[in-house]
Image: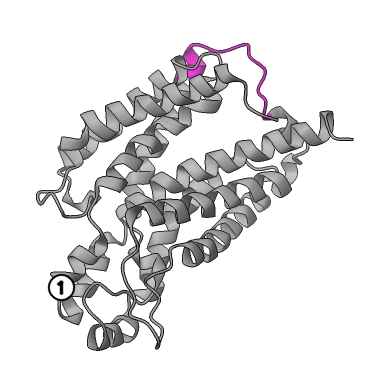
Amino acid sequence: MELPWPIKLRITAVLALGVVVIGIWAWPLAAPPDPIDIVAAYQLTPLKALGLVALSAIVGVLAYLIPWPYGRQIGPLAVPAGLAVWALRSGPIARLMQRAPDLGLRLGVFMRLRYDSIFWLVMVAAGIAGVWLAAYIWPSDCKDPADVLKKGRPRSRLLSDSLIGLAFSLAIAYLLVAAFAQGTGVIAASIPTQPAARQIAFAVLVAFWAAGFLTARFLRLGPYGPIIASALLPMMAIQLFARPDIIGPVIRQYPATCLPKAILAVLPIQMVSFGAIGAIAGYWTAVRFEYWKRNLAG
């Protein structure tokens, strides 16, 4: 069942809002000092960080109003779309590896990035909060298409299912990112390389689309668990793989652009921005599938 063109136009307008306001207009606030450096939250001043969070909330309000009356459903895409522009403009993490020739410096790079994804998640959450605030002030009488999923969700198991969904999202996203962001796995017969930004974008989108679809389809959950997982995954990857016993052999045997695990090549902003978009898209794919199964199949 194809989306009607008015819905496509609304989605396009919301994505354009995020791209223009956050991705382009607010770029100077997040741009690294070196144009070829990575985009990282630890480089932001507190004032810039607060400004970006406030701007995200404002964008969320606008993203609710522009696609009226479907702002609650479409609006959460705006902020991740803007962050995705930054993620594509960012330099690769391999750039920092080249500046960190010894083990201590290289581990320091990952330690600085360990909690970076939390800030990008806060920006996405601020955008969603803006959507919710606008929905409270200007409620829409439009029937929520996601009711087709919510009706089958037992409230008594919401907490346990949410935790299961979060764990499942982390697992499926890790496996798919590792599979599709190939190019950095150290194997004896090849020299590992940094994947291109577009390959990373594809890998993360597919991974979290799958997480969003499967958790919605089988656990009747919204996209927020997979979105949270997109911020937790970089933290867990750094904790598990950015260790001296894993990084050390790579430094001794391979060029500075090489990493021991593919997932370490994905910057936190890339994981959160494309992960949020993929999770939302996967969720709504599950909603449409459920609607088709109940009303059109057979």
x and y percent of residue 31 in the render? 17, 43
**Residue type of the residue flagged with mark 1:** Ala
Q: Which residues are magenta?
A: 134-146
* Residue 150 sits inside the magenta stretch: no
Q: Main secondary structure of the magenta part?
A: loop
Mark count? 1
Q: Which residue is mark 1?
A: 100
The image quadrant of residue 98 is bottom left
Q: Quadrant of the C terminus?
A: top right
x and y percent of residue 141 in the render? 63, 11
The image quadrant of residue 84 is top left
* Residue 141 sits inside the magenta stretch: yes
Q: Quadrant of the N terminus?
A: top right
Give 36 or 103, whichever is nearer the viewer.
36
Tell me the residue at 24%/50% (across/down): 90
Q: Is residue 275 above or below residue 106?
A: above
x and y percent of residue 19 in the render? 33, 31
Q: Within 10 angstroms of label 1, few (less than 14), some, or many (20 or more) residues?
A: some
Q: Is residue 47 above or below residue 206?
A: above
Q: Is residue 146 above or below residue 197?
A: above
